[in-house]
Amino acid sequence: MRRRGILLFAAVPVAITASVYFLLPTDSAQSPAEPPMATAQQSSRQDAKSRAERERAADDEVIASLPPGLADPAKRELAQQLVSSAENSTLDWRRAYGYIEDIGDGQGYTAGIIGFCTGTHDLLTLVERYTDDHPDNGLARYLPALRAVDGSDSHEGLDPGFTAAWKAEAERPDFQQAQLAERDRAYFDPAVRLAKLDGLGTLGQFIYFDAMVFHGPGIDGDGFYALRERALREADSPSQGGSEKAYLDIFLDIRRTAMREKRPGTDTTRIDTAQRRFLYDGNLRLRTPLEWRVYGETFRVP
């Protein structure tokens, strides 16, 4: 259910000093001096990179000083159970390594523990990364077809053998580990990191993670980052001095609306009778035992 998005970063311009105009070749007449503007742009990009690295280092220090939250092993397990209840209607999420079907949402095959999709780039990325480490795997021969159908709901080049190949590969511990690693790299780690920087506790970190899984780590209109920006325009996050409960309530409102606008009639119980219930109960630390309903089915974690 994820949609692609590309983040673009603009370099910050810097002043061009007089010394730029006196640069001379250092090699030979066949090696002309680099144009002044190119030199300035290169310096600007380096400055922007240095600032970003300093800011990230400062953020790392903040995060290191905070409780583990959803990154705690027990909470990470709980998070995957919660996602699995909505994605696969089971708490036994490890059974979903081999899951694959076209659910008719226009994004091709949905597969694996968080619903990697052939139409939304993340399944392709998973198989490419896995093939880099395991060139002889049973999915490698489908890479040309996966690249061709990326961004569409087409099965061309995948049928009839791809689903069987996925299920067979999912029996291998190496591919299971690859799914976990891609989940963390693309969804879990970015969501939890940003939630912590926004001042959110364990529940808020899960709400961000589930939104990242469902809406995708994109900047299109209903991608995760766009939803967060809309929420921040309506309410201050806790790190900005706002109320955690009020901010999360608004974020869930915005997310629910986006789900319904994208596909009218979409079931929103993963918000209405799960995440919203935890929020209204004041369970910002996502303490267990938990009970929630998704698609009319009740789930419990003791």
Image (cartoon, rainbow, N blue to C red):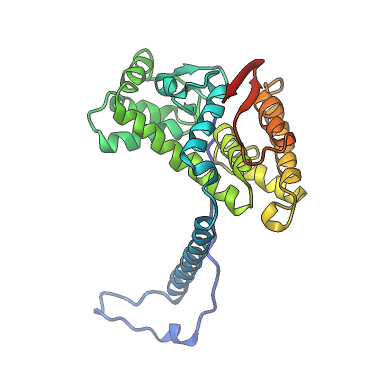
Whether residue 109 sits left or right of residue 195 in the image: it is left
Most foreground residue, 175 or 206:
206
Most foreground residue, 298 or 127:
298
Q: Residue 235: image x %, image y %?
A: 76, 49
Quarter the C terminus occupies: top right
Residue drawn at the location 69% of the way across and 35% of the way down? 255
- Res. 231 image quadrant: top right
Residue drawn at the location 77% of the way across and 48% of the way down? 234
Above-or-below relation of 245 to 20: above
Whether residue 119 sits left or right of residue 33 in the image: it is right
Asked whether residue 186 is in view, the answer is yes
Above-or-below relation of 101 to 242: above
Looking at the image, the residue that sits furthest to the top is 160
Quarter the N terminus occupies: top right
Q: Count the marks: how many? A: 0
Q: Residue 192: image x %, image y %?
A: 54, 45
Asked whether residue 268 is in view, the answer is no
Residue drawn at the location 26% of the way across and 27% of the way down? 137
Whether residue 76 sits left or right of residue 296 in the image: it is left
Above-or-below relation of 64 to 116: below
Q: Residue 44: image x %, image y %?
A: 49, 70
Most foreground residue, 205 or 30:
205
Q: Residue 62: image x %, image y %?
A: 54, 60
